[in-house]
Structure formats: structure tokens, C-alpha cells
Image (cartoon, rainbow, N blue to C red):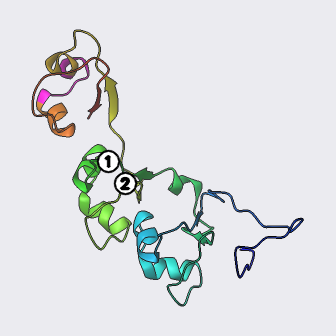
Amino acid sequence: MNNLTNNSLSIGQVLKIASDTPSNNTYMVKSGDTLYSIARNYGLSVEELKALNNLSGSALSIGQVLKIKPETTSSNETDNYYIVQKGDSLYKIANRFKTTVNEIVALNNLKSTLLSIGQRLLIPTDATANEVYVVQKGDTLYGIARKLNTTVSEIQSLNNLVSSTLSVGQKLLIP
């Protein structure tokens, strides 16, 4: 960014400083990043990432700012991103948004079903998120299902519950 050839600085030297998040459409390269890891985290192929940034090779520099989506992306499209959390799978995400694994794979041009924590996935615009319910004192799965017009098995399936034991404050996805 400053075209420095070594680590030496001079008093009064002016340096360009980059923010960690230059914009919603860009990413600043950090130590250990590769085109593959960045592309995977943002649901792109390496070829797409290279094309967005007019890169011919695969060399990256720490602090380099890369475009991660086209400037013309509509705000409606960015509202439909989901950030992968620990324990997520494509199946769980598809269930949560009432869509299919195949639709998410196609929309994000995924070459693999492996996900990375923090990876951003575009969710089909017709998909809707499930409601989140916070367990209260005295709640049971049956009572919650009845109150929210669903079934115990749907709640268990959506939340990967293996027992009917609930904890006060526990967050449950409700279809």
C-alpha cells in the first residue's frame, strides 16, 4: 500500500493506513490469506475473485484490498446473505431458510459442501428464516409446539435436539 521495500520508517514519513473493513464490497488481505481461502469464505471461485480484481497471478500482499462482490450488487441482494456459524451445515442452513441445499450450492457456485466459519452465503430471495423462540421457565417442547402452531418433531429436527430437555434461555428455531 505504501510501496515500502523494508521495515524502516523515518520521522515525519506519511503512511497510508487501511481500515479492517474498507467497505461491504471489499476485503483486506491478512497474513496467511490465499486467493482460495478468501474466495471460499465469500462464496466465490478463485477465478471469480481474480476476475473481480483484475488479477493475473495468485500473489497477494498483506493489506491489499480486494473486491469480494461487484460494485453493482443491489442492497436487496446483500440483505439475503447468511454468515456461517460454528456447527452449521448446508442442510441446517437450507432448513433454517426453507430452501434446499442444491439451491444454496447453485446460487453460491459452491464446488464443495464444506463450509468455513464466517463464510458468507447468498440465500435465495424467496427463502424465509425461521422464528427464534427463547425458552421460558416451565416451557416444554409440547407446549411450545402447541403455542406456535408446529410439532415437537419439527422443532427437534430443526434444532438437532436428541432429547426433550430444555434450558431456560435456550434459543430454539421454530418453523
Q: Which residues are magenta?
A: 145-152
> Up-down: is 155 above or below 79?
above
Query: 68 or 98: nearer the eye?
Result: 68
Residue at mark 2: 117
> What is the distance, in whole Å, between disc 2 and disc 1 at their CAs?
6 Å
Label 2's element?
loop
Q: Are marks 2 and 1 in contact (CB under 8 Å)?
A: yes
Neighbourhood count class around disc 1 (C-alpha, 10 Å): few under 14, some 14–19, many 20 upward: few
Query: Which numbered dot is residue 86?
Result: 1
Spot the residue most to the right: 12
Q: Is residue 150 magenta?
A: yes
In the displayed structure, 36 sits above or below 174; it is: below
Q: Which amino acid type corresponds to the residue marked 2 in the rendered image? A: Ile
Residue 95 drawn in magenta: no
Q: As rendered, which of 9 and 116 lies closer to the eye?
A: 9
**Image quadrant where one finds the C terminus:** top left
Judge by depth and name the residue closer to the eye, 28 or 61.
61
For residue 102, the mark is: none
The quarter of the picture where the N terminus appears is: bottom right
Return the residue found at the far bottom. 56
Query: At 36% across and 41% down in the image, what residue appears?
Result: 129
Residue 150 in the image, given as x and y percentages of width and height: 19, 27
- 71, above or below 139, in the image: below
